[in-house]
Image: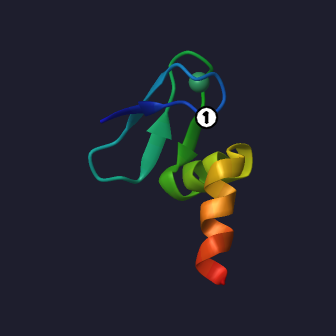
Amino acid sequence: MKIVCPDCHYTAELSDDFTSVKCANCSLDITYGEYVKHVAYKDKRYRNILSDYKL
Ligand SMILES: [Zn+2]
């Protein structure tokens, strides 16, 4: 499944079993859990959504 790379914003590939994210452009190779944390850290709107859930 194609997703957006959090580092270079090119197309990264999420494995079919949702365990790993790989980007051929910047050599990103992380787990899906790390990817979610990465995106949450970089995207302030997403962080706001997360903080809303805590209220
Ligand atoms: Zn990348």
Q: Is residue 10 left or right of residue 41?
A: left
Three-letter code for the amino acid on which mark 1 is drawn? Pro
Does any atom of ligand 1 lie closer than 8 Å to the CB of label 1?
A: yes
Q: Quadrant of residue 11?
A: top left
Q: Secondary structure at mark 1?
A: loop
> Which of the pair 19/47 is nearer the observer?
47
Whether residue 26 sits left or right of residue 3 in the image: it is right
Q: Quadrant of ligand 1?
A: top right
Q: Identify which residue is drawn at 51% across, 26% down.
A: 23
Structure colour scheme: rainbow
How many neighbours does mark 1 have within 10 angstroms: few (below 14), some (14-19), or many (20 or more)? some
Residue shown at the point (61%, 34%) measured from the top left: 6
- Disc 1 designates what residue? 6
Residue 34 location (% of width, % of height): 60, 54
In the image, residue 32 lies at what x, y percent?
49, 52
Q: Position of residue 21 (x, y in %)?
A: 47, 40
